[in-house]
Amino acid sequence: MAKRILVTGGAGFLGSHLCERLLDEGHDVLCVDNYFTGTKRNLDALVGHPHFEVMRHDVTFPLYVEVDEIYNLACPASPVHYQHDPVQTTKTSVHGAINMLGLAKRTRAKIFQASTSEVYGDPQVHPQPESYQGNVNPIGPRACYDEGKRCAETLFFDYHRQLGVRIRVARIFNTYGPRMHPDDGRVVSNFVVQALRGDPITIYGDGKQTRSFCYVDDLIEGFVRLMAAPDEVTGPINLGNPGEFTIRELADKVIELTNSSSKIVRKPVPIDDPRQRQPDIRLAKKVLGWKPTVPLEKGLERTIAYFDRLLSTG
Ligand SMILES: NC(=O)c1ccc[n+]([C@@H]2O[C@H](COP(=O)([O-])OP(=O)(O)OC[C@H]3O[C@@H](n4cnc5c(N)ncnc54)[C@H](O)[C@@H]3O)[C@@H](O)[C@H]2O)c1
């Protein structure tokens, strides 16, 4: 049955893919965004769709609409963006969560929170299961994001326990794909853009730190499955790709797939940059029957094709 679904942060990287998927399923989609990091270009293919509506709105202010489901994605997601105005970042996570949970309570909507692997901080457990409580520096430059997201999780669980709101909390690990920002400093977009431009590829430290990369379509499938799961499946639940690669391996793969002449250069490691990050997705496999299916090479090819078009059209 068609539902009225609100997607906050819908003009962003993940949000635009989610809107597209929900429209394909026949739902009525309301995209809310203040365009801080999102762009109208991400929604080009959707504008004009009879079941799609866009509203410019900042989630730190209350929103009064009638909906059946809410996906709360609004929040800058990369260090360059979330550290640009750290106070606003925490407000977006915390006030945004309060406003969207208030809306869910009033409309009795189910609500999904895009949380993050950053709630684990620099983990001392590897890979990270949902039961791991994390190692976050509360006063460092990343804290506006990490602690904001942790507080949002607290609010979700208190609205659930205290007020009976139906919640779904996903802890998202590194995701990549078309419509990532070309200049957000995230490792995949950085490497692809540098390689396509023939610029040096910057590696922080020795390049032996590992990351896992999930292709966007796999992640969105996880979102939709989590929202559709029975109400006792509240999460938090890890969504990500457990395949682990060193940063150096990623750089070499990108150079190979782009046929680039770029050379690798090294820079100092930023403060609080984690050494290892890998999701434990046993819970998602068990309760959602979900696991990623797109191999890194395939996902990178699609991402490279997107950036190639973007850079050549300006
Ligand atoms: N992409 C990832 O790898 C990843 C990993 C972990 C968590 N997440 C989470 O997923 C969500 C989406 O991330 P993304 O990668 O698509 O980032 P993004 O920056 O592309 O999207 C975020 C969207 O939120 C909007 N936004 C920011 N502040 C807002 C506000 N106050 N009011 C309304 N809209 C606002 C931005 O304009 C943007 O369109 C974020 O909450 C992020 O924390 C993403």
Image: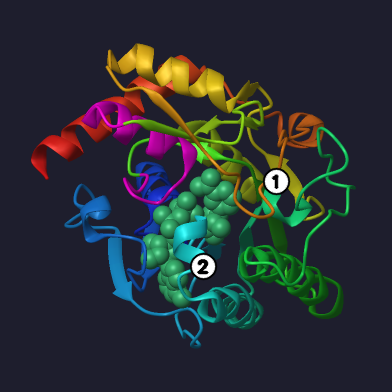
Residue at the left extreme? 313
Name the residue that disc number 2 marks.
83
Q: Position of residue 11 (x, y in %)?
A: 34, 59
Q: Where, by quadrant of the figure, is residue 138 drawn? A: bottom right
Sequence-wise, the earlier of marks 1 and 2 is 2
How far is the residue under mark 1 from the one under mark 2?
A: 34 Å
Q: Give the camera-side residue of 196 and 26.
A: 196
- Residue 160 appears in view: yes
The segment highlighted magenta reads: 180-199
Asked whether the residues under the numbered discs 1 and 2 touch, taking CB atoms below 8 Å apart as contact, a structural biologist would say no
Residue located 29% across and 17% down the image: 258
128 left or right of 31 in image: right
Q: Give the camera-side residue of 158 and 148.
A: 148
310 left or right of 19 in image: left
Q: Secondary structure at mark 1?
A: loop
Q: Amino acid at mark 1?
A: Ala
Q: Is residue 182 magenta?
A: yes
Q: Position of residue 210 (x, y in %)?
A: 66, 29
> In the figure, 72 relative to 268: above or below?
below
Q: Is residue 17 magenta?
A: no
Structural crowding at the residue carrying mark 2, measured as other residues with C-alpha within 10 Å and reported as few (<14), some (14–19) or many (≥20): some
Q: Position of residue 12 (x, y in %)?
A: 38, 56
Q: Amino acid at mark 2?
A: Gln
- Quadrant of the drawing holding the C terminus: top left
Name the residue that disc number 1 marks.
229
Q: Where, by quadrant of the figure, is residue 65 drawn? A: bottom left
